[in-house]
Amino acid sequence: MIIAITILAIAIATLVIGFALGVAYRKRSYEQALDVATQTATGIIETAKKEAAASKKEAIIEAKEENHRYRSEIESELKERRSEIQRQENRLLQREEILDRKDTALDKREDVLEKKEAQLDSDQKVVTKQKEQASLLVKEQQDKLEEIAALTRPEAKELILNETKEELIHERAVMIKESEEETKATVDRKAKSLIAQAIQRSAADMVSETTVSVVNLPNDEMKGRIIGREGRNIRTLETLTGVDLIIDDTPEAVVLSAFDPIRREIARVALEKLIVDGRIHPARIEEMVEKAQKEVETQIREDGENAAMDVGVHGIHPELLKLLGRMKFRSSYGQNALKHSIEVAQLSGLLAGEIGVDVRMAKRAGLLHDIGKSIDHEVEGSHIEIGVNLCKKYKETPIVINAVAAHHGDVEPESLIACIVQAADAISAARPGARRETLETYTNRLKQLEDITNQFKGVEKSFAIQAGREIRVMVVPEHVNDSEMVLLARDIAKQIEAELEYPGQIKVNVIRESRAVDYAK
């Protein structure tokens, strides 16, 4: 019994001890788990704080970037608007300068007219004085004649008037010759002044036709791409080509302006390539301009070779062929210089064949007669002088050189071929329609020219030649003497200037022929 109680007591004590140990162990486990959970929660909180700080920082950075981007766009738009305003201001300033120059030119012309009017007044006074002196002289002679000779008053008056008239005619002719000599001495200066005034006051239609090319655009947005940021693209293109780009309100078009047709063609080809390519920036512009230069040079050479081949002329120097191809971009009164040269070559060949002269040489001279026009805007001198120098440089024959020099009558022709080229040139230029003139206008102008000339006393007949650029007047030798010829030519020229409108100048050639015929029997 005691043993059982003892065992029971031991068992109870063991249970109590085990329970106490279990409670202690469980409490320790709970405390450890609580510590782990506390540490985990702290780590999560720290992580969350770090992520929140990073997100806040990224949001601030994105907001700053968005603000910077928006500001850049606003500044760019403001720059473009400012540049557009600046361009408009520059245009207005240019227009003001043009108006000022025109005003100055008008003032100068007014001064010249005033000086001319003063000179006319002075001349009128001189003429009046001379008339008074002539009247006194006539009276004195009349008195002497009445005293000495047995002449009536009307007879003496007629005799004196005839003598005075002949003296005045002679003096007038001498004065005209002296005036012409003085004019020749100052012709270059006056010609330059007149040309400058004509350019300032003439209409721009003809000038624009020969100095402007138009490039069509797919849309108006392309204008902004051509201009580029701050105008870099357009400046690059103008610098590389030497051509002015005019970008105005004209829809879907850009105007290229330059006096050099070759440069203008290069700029046109390069710009068309850039528009098709779509990539417009300075490096690309430079590349396209180089390609356009090569293409235009190739085209010029091919045009020259084709022209020589079309007329059957061979053995021309390659440099002359290039210059011949450049004439495709040259015009005179609307007539293409290359086509005109081909026409002259063909006509020269036909004329040479009819009269039995070397056809190939005639075609060669006709093809090269205007070769100087290919570089007359680059080299000083007339196209005849330039053409002669070019033919000498590239070893052309003396016949060809003389034909080039004589085709406008500046020098005497030394061969039949030179005469043939001169005639063929006149035929090609005088062909109705060749130089933008209708047949009716052409014939009316020639008829009016002959009618004006035939009105003058002493004129037997007249002929308008060289497409109206020269009028030859045949006078009756018994009615017009040598002194009166000078006056007649001047009067006809003044009458033509007053009544007709014509390009260039008209040469008045008065011819007086006296013959003495006898027969030996």
Image (spheres, grey):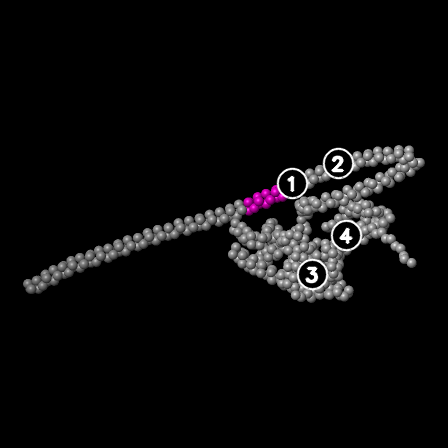
From the viewer's perspective, is 17 left or right of 38? left
Visible residue check, residue 444: no
Please tell me whether mark 2 or mark 3 is closer to you in this view: 3
Q: What residue type is labelled 2?
A: Ser
Mark 1: which secondary structure? Answer: helix
Q: What residue type is labelled 1?
A: Thr
Q: Name the residue under label 3.
A: 398
Q: What stretch is highlighted in magenta?
A: 84-102
Q: Mark 1 points at which residue?
A: 104
Spatial distance from mark 4 to mark 1, Cα to Cα? 36 Å
- Dominant secondary structure, magenta: helix
Q: Position of residue 296 (x, y in %)?
A: 60, 60
Q: Name the residue under label 4.
A: 470
Query: Which image quadrant for residue 138?
Result: top right
462 vs 174: above or below: below
Mark 3: which secondary structure? Answer: helix
Q: Mark 2 points at which residue?
A: 122
Nearer the N terminus, badge 3 or badge 4?
A: 3
From the viewer's perspective, is 118 left or right of 303? right
| Quadrant housing the N terminus | bottom left
Spatial distance from mark 3 to mark 1, Cα to Cα? 50 Å
Spatial distance from mark 2 to mark 4, Cα to Cα? 34 Å
Q: Which amino acid does label 3 sit on?
A: Pro
Q: What residue type is labelled 4?
A: Glu
Spatial distance from mark 2 to mark 3, Cα to Cα? 54 Å
Spatial distance from mark 2 to mark 1, Cα to Cα? 27 Å
Nearer the N terminus, badge 4 or badge 1?
A: 1
